[in-house]
Amino acid sequence: MRIATWNVNSIRSRQEHLLAWLDQSRPDVVGLQETKVPDGEFPHGPLEALGYQAAVSGQKTYNGVALLSPHDLEDVRVGFTALLPGDAEAEALGEQRRVISAWVEGVRVVDLYVPNGSALESDKYGYKLAWLGCLRRYLDVQRSQGEPLCVLGDFNIAPEARDIHDPARLEGGIMASAAEREALRACLGDDLQDAFRLFASATGHWSWWDYRSGGWPRDRGWRIDHVYLCPLLQQRALGCRIDRDERGRERPSDHAPVVVELADEPEEDPEE
């Protein structure tokens, strides 16, 4: 089973890139972020022509998440309130479309677009920390349901210094502050593990290169797009890669896809 995450930074602008990548890579499920279209304008037709269905939660101009799969997308849940009904903060935070999940081929896939936070002195930074606090509660409920769990998306957080091209300058700032990292660790708990770090320990692996300041040609990147796996799925993990080639295309997203490969779930022995 192949599971991917990709911040496409506008599905309108990157539709042809996405279709070509899907046709070549054929993931079993992919979580998209920053689709930036209302639900009624999502390009279902071209995706269906490739054999992919989509579950979407979008809004005009900003944010937006979607799950794509050639398999059935079952029990689709949109927003924090799907698991936190009656939670006033979850309802308020849900005005920005950043959370969607579905049951796909025996796995609960949760697709997230975590707020950027802008700057440590910005009100958006406080919003980001509040959002992560709500995510922790959401994932606690999700864990209680006992489903095999994959949490993926654009987290806008570099977990460690090795996930930044220039940690001496950037450590402690936005996307690399102690409070953000602590909030992320609280969300993940002891069970959800970074799939990429199961296979690669070195620095120099990036998933996002800023459009500004020559980020891509200078390879000045960050690893902020992640796939987290529960213990059961960790046992099935065969590899995880960042598809850098997509960032090098003409008019690309500033993010590259991250893809994890899982072994097929073993069949149960027939009863004798």
Image (cartoon, rainbow, N blue to C red):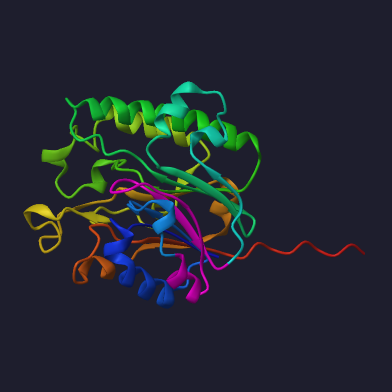
Q: Where is residue 101 in the image (x, y as percent from the top left)?
A: 53, 47
Height in image: 153 above or below 175?
A: below
Q: Which residue is drawn at 24% across and 42% down?
A: 161
Check if residue 184 falls in the magenta segment: no
Q: Say whether residue 146 is left or right of residue 62.
A: right
Q: Residue at x 47, y 73 (%)?
A: 26
Check if residue 58 falls in the magenta segment: yes
Outermost residue, front direction? 40
Q: Say whether residue 196 is left or right of residue 234.
A: left
Please state the extent of the stretch shown in magenta in the rendering.
Answer: 44-70
Q: Which of 68 and 194 is in front in this view?
A: 68
Residue 206 in view, yes or no:
no
Outermost residue, right direction? 272
Q: Where is residue 197 in the image (x, y as percent from the top left)?
A: 39, 51
Q: Where is residue 190 in the image (x, y as percent from the top left)?
A: 50, 35
Assign the N terminus to one quadrant of the image: bottom right
Q: Residue at x 10, y 53 (%)?
A: 212
